[in-house]
């Protein structure tokens, strides 16, 4: 009998442990997969968490974010909408859903979601910054500036993006001196933010400070050599300098690498000096 008991104990020692998974363990593992870029595995774990608890709002939010990362906008919106139903006073799903609407060109819906996020949390910085960007896109510049001002007031730790975005708004309004001042502030806070140099350079170029403009674009290119918009900005600088050959070479380089914002190239005032050139017409032929 003692031998049988000993055998049973030995077998139990070699049996795999039967760990019971919980909604939290699935959720946390989903977060880890998401952090590593293992998106399908993250979705699988968030889904398992939701099977155990269909009212787990955070799992819907993060699964929605992952679906968005996978460019599955419909599924992302569905999950974020479910999260809103479960937690109507949480600004995060409103803000994330607003980002999807904005990217899809549904600006009114995006503004509505960002406004709801602010209504439930008046100190939610991201909603002000993101709503400001939508207002800028649709040309409501004063409202955009108001939102960026609020974001700057609320976030005393890192206002890089708020200053940068407000600078872009002034740039779009043609107020280049104000734009430069905001880009200056963004650069002081974060000296490695390439886009601040790019757009300060473009602003310098449009007020005739071509030396400063070229220095800034080269600095931006040094910080982010693969950024297509910065490559094209080199073309803009040479265009303003009436160096048609260099402008066309840089423009061609940007397009060859994937830049395809044809409307920007056709309408931006920075390219007006080369639009009649044969090299420009050749590059833009059929586009």
Image (spheres, helix red, strand yellow):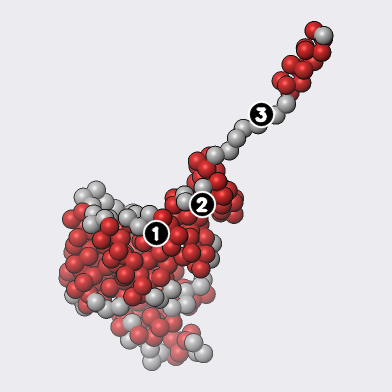
Separation (CA) of disc 3 from disc 1 = 38 Å
Instruction: Where is residue 101? Give x, y as percent.
Output: 41, 70
Q: Name the residue under label 2.
A: 54
User: Tag 2's secondary structure?
Assistant: loop
List the residue tagged with mark 3: 17
**Image coordinates for residue 160, horizontal then vertical, percent:** 27, 56
Q: Is mark 3 on a helix, strand or loop?
A: loop
Q: Which of marks 3 and 2 is in front?
A: 2
How many residues crowd around disc 1 within 10 Å: few (fewer than 14), some, or many (20 or more)?
many
- Across and down, in percent, residue 45 comes to 57, 48
Q: Nearer the viewer, mark 3 or mark 1?
A: 1
Q: Which of 229 and 145 is in front in this view?
A: 145
Question: Label 1: which residue?
Answer: 84
For the N terminus, which image quadrant? top right
Do the numbered discs 3 and 2 sit on residues whose CB atoms are within 8 Å? no
Whichever of callouts 3 and 2 sits on the residue coming sooner in the sequence is 3
Q: Residue at x 48, y 55 (%)?
A: 60
Task: Point out which mark residue 18 bears.
Answer: none
Where on the picture, by quarter, is residue 133? bottom left
Q: In the image, what residue occupies the spot 43% across and 73% down?
A: 104
The residue mark sitting in front, 2 or 1, is 2
Instruction: Answer few, some or many: residues within 10 Å of disc 2's Cα (few below 14, many 20 plus, some between 14 and 19).
Output: some
**Secondary element at tag 1:** helix
Please say whether residue 29 is visible from this viewpoint.
Answer: no
Residue that lies at the very extreme toward the front in this rendered image: 1
Please tell me which of labels 2 and 1 falls first in the chain. 2
Residue ranking furthest to the top: 2
Q: Residue at x 19, y 62 (%)?
A: 149
């Amino acid at each position: 009998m003692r031998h049988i008991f000993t055998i049973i104990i030995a077998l139990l020692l070699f049996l795999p442990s039967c760990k019971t998974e919980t909604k939290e363990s699935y959720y946390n593992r989903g977060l880890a997969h998401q952090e590593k870029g293992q998106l399908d595995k993250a979705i699988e774990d968030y889904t398992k968490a939701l099977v155990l608890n269909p009212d787990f709002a955070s799992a819907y939010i993060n699964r929605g974010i992952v679906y968005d990362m996978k460019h599955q906008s419909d599924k992302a919106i569905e999950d974020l909408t479910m999260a809103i139903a479960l937690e109507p006073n949480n600004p995060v799903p409103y803000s994330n859903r607003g980002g999807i609407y904005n990217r899809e060109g549904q600006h009114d819906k995006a503004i509505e979601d960002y406004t709801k996020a602010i209504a439930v949390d008046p100190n939610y910085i991201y909603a002000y910054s993101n709503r400001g960007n939508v207002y800028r896109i649709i040309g409501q510049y004063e409202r955009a500036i108001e939102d960026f001002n609020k974001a700057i007031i609320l976030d005393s730790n890192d206002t890089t993006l708020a200053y940068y975005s407000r600078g872009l708004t002034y740039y779009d309004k043609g107020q280049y001196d104000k734009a430069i001042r905001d880009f200056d502030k963004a650069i002081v806070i974060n000296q490695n933010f390439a886009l601040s140099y790019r757009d300060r350079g473009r602003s310098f170029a449009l007020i005739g400070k071509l030396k400063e403009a070229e220095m800034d674009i080269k600095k931006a290119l040094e910080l982010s050599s693969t950024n297509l918009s910065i490559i094209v900005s080199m073309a803009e600088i040479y265009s303003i300098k009436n160096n048609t050959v260099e402008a066309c070479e840089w423009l061609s380089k940007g397009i060859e690498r994937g830049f395809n914002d044809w409307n920007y190239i056709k309408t931006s005032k920075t390219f007006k000096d080369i639009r009649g050139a044969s090299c420009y017409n050749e590059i833009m032929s059929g586009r």
